[in-house]
Amino acid sequence: MNTFFKQKKEALIIAVIIGIIVILLLILIFSSLSNPTTTNQQGVPTNTQLTPEAIHPNTTSVPTSNPKQIESSNEYKDSVDKIAEKNKSALQRDAAVADLLDIVPYKGSHFTLTYSYKTNEFTLVVDKNNKALGSQEFDQWLKEHNVDSRSWIKNLTYK
């Protein structure tokens, strides 16, 4: 009796496996019928329903020359040149101030200039006993380093 149930159990397992295989084959067959494929030159299957026209609609995208566009292009270039010229002096001022970073901390006879990367600040300390002389010496030192005015240094603090 025990072997009878054992045989039934094995037959049931085999039937279930065959059923799963049949279902998978049917799914594979129906999916290939609903989505026909061909192979390209490399032998890779490709979908025949997907055409270049489906990806990119057939529209003309050839650029055409328009005199108004050329004029506006020149206008754009001119405006860029004007902006660059307007900003040129500011860029030169900023570059001159940035060059000071290479020579600070600096100690003159009557002033000291330091820079803090942490706070992004230049600090000017003028000799308290000779404020006028220290201030004059600092301004002269700036001019020697292509900085015409203290106002060029946006983050200058006094102590």
Image: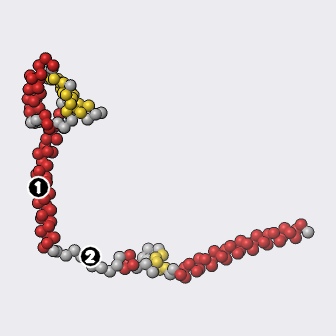
- Tell me which residue sits at (11%, 55%) in the image: 82
Q: Quadrant of the C terminus?
A: top left
Residue 53 vs 106, above or below: the answer is below
Q: Residue at x 79, y 69 (%)?
A: 10
Task: Name which of mark 2 and mark 1 comes first in the sequence.
Answer: 2
Q: Secondary structure at mark 2?
A: loop
Image spot of residue 9 (x, y percent): 81, 69
Instruction: Indicate the amino acid at tag 2.
Output: Ser
Residue at 38% across, 76% down = 55
* Displayed quadrant of residue 152: top left
**Looking at the rendering, which quadrant does residue 112 occupy?**
top left
Using the numbered discs, state the Cα–Cα distance from disc 2 to disc 1 in whole angstroms: 33 Å
Position above or below: 83 against 134:
below
Image location (x, y in percent) of residue 114: 21, 28
Coloring scheme used: secondary structure
Whether residues under marks 2 and 1 lie with C-beta atoms below 8 angstroms apart, the answer is no
Judged from the image, the secondary structure of the residue bearing numbered disc 1 is: helix
Q: Nearer the viewer, residue 19 or 130?
A: 130
- Give the number of the mark in front: 2 or 1: 1
- Give the labeled residue for mark 1: 82
**Is 129 in front, or is 72?**
129
Identify whether 10 is placed above or below 114: below
Q: Name the residue located 8 percent from the left edge and 33 percent from the top edge.
A: 143
Is residue 120 among the parts visible in the rendering?
yes
Q: Amino acid at mark 1?
A: Lys
x then y, percent, for residue 109:
12, 20
Q: Quick check: 156 left or right of 148? A: right
Say whether residue 1 is left or right of residue 61: right
- Quadrant in which the N terminus appears: bottom right
Q: Position of residue 41 (x, y in %)?
A: 42, 76
Q: Which residue is mark 2?
A: 61
